[in-house]
Amino acid sequence: ALWSTGMAIGVIAVASTPGYGVDLADYLFGSLLTVSTADLWLMAVVDLLLLLLFATHLREFAAISFDPEFAELRDLPVARLELLLLVVLALTAVLLARVVGLVLVVALLALPAAIARRFTDRLLSMAVLACLIAGLCTTLGIGLSWQFDWPSGASIVIVAATLYLLGLALARLRSAPSR
């Protein structure tokens, strides 16, 4: 995530410099202008399907993620579930690449989950909170992108990195001995 955050800062700096083309930057770092109405509908349908999939299979995914041997002993189809999870991850990465770009996908997948992990230890709560945080980061990042004419992907990741750093600071304040 640190590398992606540095890349996001660099992308904003390059995009803010007159004379630099953004065609390659749009592909690597995202652009809302490349997202069509059909893409938005596809994203909405896939989001609903993913929510349904995780709502019905969260326990199985948790079992194969944390202890695949135990899941196998419980007669779960571990190989099929792992394949399904990888397909879901790949599909999510491809859809995210349309908005935030190829380079910043990892950051948008990792940072909201890392932020949510600071506030809960429960898997379901963490997943819901990570989704809400990702939505907040996307909304605020798009606002920054529009306001300052920055690339959308880099702006979204900067917001996510800022929230992550704020979460770290809050955790340190909470764990500091009081006087």
Image (cartoon, rainbow, N blue to C red):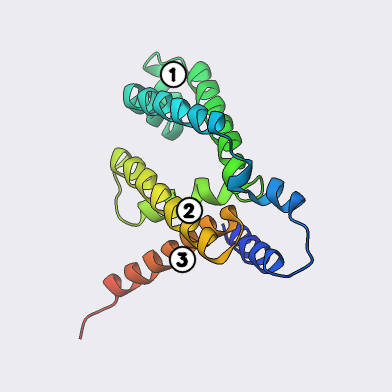
Graded by Cα atoms within 10 Å as few (under 14), some (14 to 19) or many (20 or more), the crowding at tag 1 reads some
Which label was assigned to residue 111? 2
The amino acid pointed to by label 2 is: Leu
Helix, strand or loop status at disc 2: helix
The amino acid pointed to by label 1 is: Glu
Task: Name the residue carrying label 3.
Answer: 162
Graded by Cα atoms within 10 Å as few (under 14), some (14 to 19) or many (20 or more), the crowding at tag 3 reads some
What is the CA distance from the residue labelled 1 to the residue labelled 3?
Answer: 40 Å
The amino acid pointed to by label 3 is: Thr
Which label was assigned to residue 23? none
Is residue 105 shown to the viewer in this render? no
Q: x and y percent of residue 90 in the render?
A: 59, 31
What residue is at 42 percent from the left and 35 percent from the top?
Answer: 66
Quarter of the picture holding the C terminus: bottom left
Q: x and y percent of residue 162 in the render?
A: 46, 66
Q: Which of marks 3 and 2 is in front?
A: 3
What residue is at 40 percent from the left and 18 percent from the top?
Answer: 73
Graded by Cα atoms within 10 Å as few (under 14), some (14 to 19) or many (20 or more), the crowding at tag 2 reads many
Helix, strand or loop status at disc 1: helix
Q: x and y percent of residue 109 in the render?
A: 51, 45
What is the CA distance from the residue labelled 2 to the residue labelled 1?
Answer: 31 Å
> Is residue 85 left or right of 61 when viewed as pictured?
right
Quarter of the picture holding the N terminus: bottom right
Residue 44, above or below 104? above
Q: In which quarter of the image is residue 86?
A: top right
